[in-house]
Amino acid sequence: MSKTIGILTAGGDSPGLNAAIRGVGKAALGHYGMHIVGFRDGFRGLMENRTAPLDGGQLSGILTVGGTILGTSRDKPHKMPVGGKLVNMLDSIAGNYHVNHLDCLVCLGGGGTVKNALRLKQMGLNVITLPKTIDNDVAGTDTTFGFDTALGIATEAIDRLHSTAHSHHRIIVVEIMGHRAGWLALGAGIAGGADVILTPEIPYEVDSVAEAIRARVRGGKPFSIVAVAEGAMSKQDLATIAAARSAGRKSSKLRDGRKADDQEADAAELLYADRTLRLAKHLEALTGLEARVTILGHVQRGGAPSAADRILATRLGTACADLIANGRYGVMVAAKGDGTRPVRLEEVAGKVKTVPINHSWIGSARRVGTNFGD
Ligand code: F6P
């Protein structure tokens, strides 16, 4: 009897999701003769049994399209907002898995989705994940689809910022996504020739950045591009968060019913909120140059996937269909060299792939004179 597979996309959207849906779907339908059904808006759609037909026509014309035709959400199966509360909906989700007679549920998502898929696996469901995110921070895979596209967009932005920074003799601080990993800022910073690259993996000193910019001025270059990852932190910001943490831990009772971790999160939130603006102001004061801030934001996630992401998503999607045909479940389909390999969800869940500080990209950037603020 032919198998029935469900597909959903979860977490932030990412270029290449539709290419991956198409890859799984066309291989499953056309090559293996399986049935396929989509669920709308991530785990929420599965919980509410909101399905989307994917049995043919819907898979055509989507390879090049950004976003996800299924819609997505950040809702977690075990903490789903329902009626103003966070409710454990794992049983409803498992129920709808069976109502739809699924042999496997394919979840396209990042690190959070792997954790959620593992919860379903532990309930006895057959699940497979595909690694997508512009952040490139999923453990166990060489790379994730979405990253190459975002890298291209952020690089083009830096290219464009260069000419205006140069014309006005300004510092331009460009904030690049990446959550708590610096892959995107590092990659775009290198490709765009940023003078300073700040990442979460290397806590920075504003004075070191300012001195690098002043040295450029002395060398006849009165402009600089600072590529800062959204998760980058100065040593001072980190000290502030550590102080909030220890203050929270010392108070034995919960203040206003809130925990120490909440206080730490508040401190971090406050620092994140305007951190890039504060950095620019600080650099203005320390260098005497005018500074401007550009926050690239969701532009980095929108629009058509690059050729590399279309290929990667197709490779991972078709490999996923092969695994289902062979009855191999409970894994993430990872990119490995020119091929793919299944990695057990347990080996990936809860891990974040940040940039190793001895990574060759960092070494190369340093050798062309890039400052990392350390
Ligand atoms: O994980 C992808 C990502 O774009 C991160 O780079 C960023 O921190 C986050 O999502 C933004 O999430 P949202 O779109 O929910 O604001």
Image (tube, grey):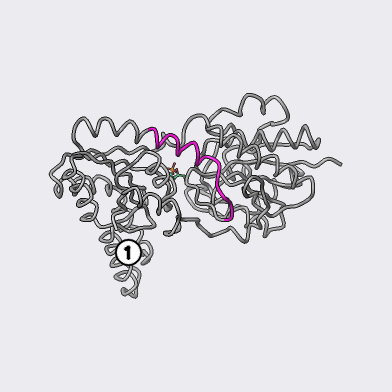
In the figure, is residue 341 to the left or right of 196? right
Foreground of the two, 338 or 323? 338
**Does 203 appear above or below 190?**
below
Foreground of the two, 173 or 244? 173
Foreground of the two, 274 or 307? 307
Foreground of the two, 343 or 170? 170
**Does 122 appear above or below 283?**
below
Badge 1: how crowded within 10 Å, few (<14), some, or many (20+)?
few
**Does 235 appear above or below 159?**
below
Residue 136 on image: x %, y %: 50, 48
Q: In the rendered view of the protein, which quadrant contains the N terminus?
A: top right
Q: In percent of the image, x 55 and y 41: which residue is there?
A: 145
Residue 2 on image: x %, y %: 83, 40
All told, the count of numbered labels is 1
Q: In percent of the image, x 25 and y 57: which residue is there?
A: 205
**Amino acid under disc 1:** Asp
Residue 225 on image: x %, y %: 28, 41
Taking the image in four quarters, ligand 1 sits in the one at top left
What residue range appears in magenta? 140-156
Q: Is 81 part of what is drawn in magenta?
A: no
Q: Which residue lies furthest to the right in this view?
A: 1
Q: In the rendered view of the protein, which quadrant contains the C terminus?
A: bottom left
Residue 348 lies in quadrant? bottom right
Q: Is 153 part of what is drawn in magenta?
A: yes
Which residue corresponds to mark 1? 256
In the figure, is residue 308 to the left or right of 283? right
In the figure, is residue 73 to the left or right of 37? left
**Does 184 appear above or below 264?**
above
